[in-house]
Image: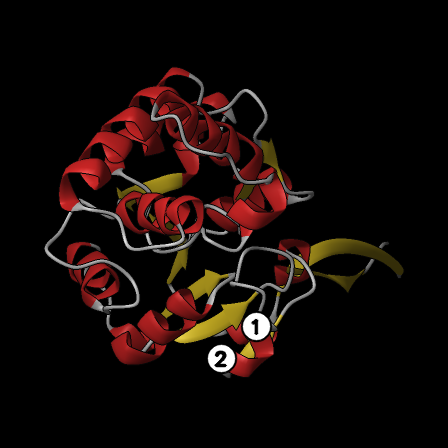
Amino acid sequence: MHSTHSPALHSALKGKRLIAFDLDGTLIDSVPDLAAAVAGSLNELGLRQPSELEVRDWVGNGVPMLVERALTWALKAAPEPELQERAYNAFMAHYGAAPNTLTTLYPGVQHTLKALHTYGLTLVLITNKPERFIEPLLSHFKLLEYFTLWIGGDSLAEKKPHPLPLLHAAKVCQMSPAECVMIGDSRHDIAAGKAAGFTTLALPYGYNHGEPIDESDPDQVLTSLTELLMTAPQVTRTV
């Protein structure tokens, strides 16, 4: 007999059929491009621009909230609706022109998604990023083929932390919440997962408004996505 090694799934995935992933801060580090778009839009309005580090703490609730936080920071006051709309339109133009110039995949993402997909698990993407940016980014990083469904922050009537996007994904894929997992880097992902009845797995390296992710009480914190794949020995008999 001799022993070989092949990947086995993490125990948290036992009995699961669908895995929902967040995008920004989970699969990709998009803050550099988001920060550049924020800076470009504020510069266009004659306002001071924040650092990339400051923008990192504003990401997670979708573009309208990102723009509002940036304006509030620049003005040191709540923005008027007209200025908010101008800034939003400017941001969408800047970000749309260069959504992946500085954005990078986190280590192990491609390998992990490919392996999970090969196992026959249904993978979906649930992000608060506007839907129009999802497919170009997935295509750019060659991840498109792994996902059955993707849902943006403007795809449905509600976005995370509301459970609607997660429940919608489960329904479309004909899965029960008990068969589903939500993986993300922020309290919004964990709150949405809990409200939807999904198992929640958290990553500590993304964008969570400066808060430790374990304070959101996920079912488990992973150090990286590659933890989903565990190497298990297989004993084979030779004659």
Residue 182 vertical placement versus 130 (above, below): below
Q: Quadrant of the C terminus?
A: bottom right
The extreme right residue here reads 2
Q: Amino acid at mark 1?
A: Ile
Circle 1 Cα neighbour tier, 10 Å, few/some/many (<14 / 14–19 / ≥20): many
Question: Between marks 2 and 1, how big is the CA–CA gap?
Answer: 6 Å
187 displayed left or right of 50 = left
**Viewer-side residue, 127 vs 209:** 209
Q: Amino acid at mark 2?
A: Ser
Q: Position of residue 106 (x, y in %)?
A: 64, 42
The residue drawn where x is 50% and y is 44% is 118
The numbered disc on residue 225 is: none
The numbered disc on residue 216 is: 2
Q: Is residue 16 visible?
A: no
Q: Quadrant of the N terminus?
A: bottom right
Q: Is residue 48 visible?
A: yes
Quadrant hosting residue 173: bottom left
Mark 1 secondary-structure assignment: helix
**Viewer-side residue, 37 vs 214:** 37
The residue drawn where x is 42% and y is 76% is 199
Circle 2 Cα neighbour tier, 10 Å, few/some/many (<14 / 14–19 / ≥20): some
The residue drawn where x is 40% and y is 30% is 42
Mark 2 secondary-structure assignment: helix
Visual colour scheme:
secondary structure
Q: Position of residue 63 (x, y in %)?
A: 31, 43
Q: Position of residue 31 (x, y in %)?
A: 54, 40
The numbered disc on residue 213 is: 1
Disc 2 vs disc 1: Cβ atoms closer than 8 Å?
yes
Residue 96 vertical placement versus 185 (above, below): above
